[in-house]
Amino acid sequence: MLSHFNDHSLFFRAFEKSSIGMALISYDGRFLQMNPSLCKMLGYSEGELLNLGLTSVSHPEDVEADLEICRKLVQGEIDGYHIEKRYIHKSGSLLWGLLNVTAERNEQVKGNDLFICTIVNITEQKVKEEEFKKIEELHNLISEHSQDVILRLTPDGMITYASPAIRNQLGYAPDELVGKYAYDYWHPDDRNGGWLRRGNSDHSDSRIFIYRLRHKNGHYIWQESHSKKIRNAAGDVQHVISMGRDITERVQSEELIRRSEKLSLVGELAAGIAHEIRNPLTSLRGFMQMYVKEDMDGTKKLRNEVMLSEIDRINEIVSELLVLAKPSNEAFELRDVVHILNHVTRLLEGQANLHNVQIKLELDDNLSSIQCQRSINQVFINVLKNAIESMPKGGEVTIQAKQKNDNIYIRIQDEGYGIPQEEITKIGNPFFTTKETGTGLGLMVSMRIIQNHNGTMRIESEVGKGTMVEVVLPVVT
């Protein structure tokens, strides 16, 4: 049967000695001859394989596909093929083989074609691929569902992968960031030379960073990231893995705590200072009033009245200090927000007219009442007064009040100078002010009052376009 191969002694020597499993198969799938490597691979002796068909050692699930491609080979539609398929070892264990089949056609005797098969054992490779696939599936599962952003970076900081959580944190689709440099999105004040950049003296392999990142909408969020350099066997950095969590709320809460502590400290100082100042002020003012009444000289009278006015100014500042010192003892009462805002508007209407400022009210109907103290009026007086004074050339102040769920949102928007972004965070700090003659206590007192009412105050501003102050107060439920 193999007489036409007798002249090919070189082929048969290679056939016998090859470390790759090799076999000659008849057109109907019977083993005609196989080398020792194939016998060893499948666990059968040569005699056992000669009595078995190719399908007998194939995995049952792969037989149908194998027979279909064999049919094409027998019918001459193809001259060869190679596929990955599973085999059953004599012990019953599974192994993977890379099967390569080529046809040796017998043109003289129809149906006497031979097929030369080589089978490379790729079981170890397939096991590793399966393990890698499971790891990759687990990685994808974590990446797809983690609330933290996972980034893979090149050694110089270019993003090569971004998890879907980036959309919720920064507003970008993952593909929008691939190929971009991570440091380009950091706040300029937080870059500190860059951990990954050349020349940086920090050679540690892992770091925890807290920094600001630019959102797609332009504002910044605070992020805490755990980053680690991944090195190859030679010790070179291949890439960097970073996991980042949005901690904006945490940072804001910590800032509120710090500010509250400052308020408490300032309050303690203010209480002592205010009482020490107020007593002599009372005496000074009393005597000054006597001088004003007794002195008929116009020049002296004017000078004394100026001094009296300045004493009243000092007394006003002392009163604000006392508000800082402790919460008001006023009782809380049920009050109408619309009535409060209308009252404040009427109080400052004269000052608004002097500055050529129009006050526009946009108040929703049927706003719920709030439990508040009379001091709540001072908050809106301070804010509205600041809005008017920020527009010396005139303009419009809009006061809006809307109810959403269990809160009332009151917004006061002006068209004034605006406040630089770097100064907004300082508003409410002791004695910080953007006005030449201000004390910085007005908004500080306002924030304290709102805090005592379980509300919040937020400020947005853009230089040249104006400032918006939003006060959120709980309604009566």
Image: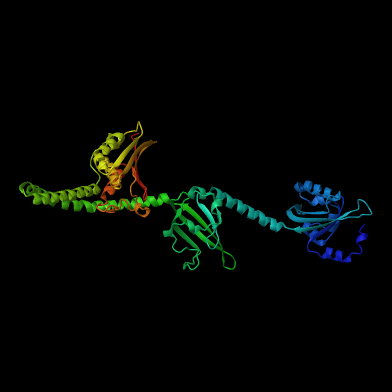
Q: How many callouts does the rendering have?
A: 0
Rendered-image quadrant of the C terminus: top left
Which residue is at 46% across, 59% downward?
Answer: 208
Residue 20 or 255: which is nearer the viewer?
A: 255
275 in relation to 405, above or below: below
Which residue is at 59% across, 68% downward?
Answer: 234
Is residue 278 visible in the rendered image? The answer is no
Rendered-image quadrant of the N terminus: bottom right
Instruction: Say whether residue 370 is left or right of residue 216.
Output: left
In the picture as drawn, the residue positioned furthest to the top comes out as 366
Which residue is at 12% across, 49% downward?
Answer: 305
353 in relation to 52, above or below: above
Residue 323 or 17: which is nearer the viewer?
A: 323
Residue 45 is situated, as x and y percent measured from the top left of the image, at: 83, 58
Residue 338 is situated, as x and y percent measured from the top left of the image, at: 31, 34
Question: Which image quadrant is residue 348 in?
Answer: top left
Residue 185 or 78: which is nearer the viewer?
A: 185
Residue 300 or 371: which is nearer the viewer?
A: 300
332 in relation to 26, above or below: above
Asked which colour scheme the image uses, the reply is: rainbow
Residue 146 is situated, as x and y percent measured from the top left of the image, at: 52, 49
Instruction: Say whether residue 414 is left or right of residue 5.
Output: left
Residue 243 is situated, as x and y percent measured from the top left of the image, at: 50, 55
Instruction: Say whether residue 361 is left or right of residue 164.
Output: left
Instruction: Say whether residue 94 is left or right of residue 72.
Output: left
Is residue 150 visible in the rendered image? The answer is yes
Which residue is at 72% across, 58% downward?
Answer: 122
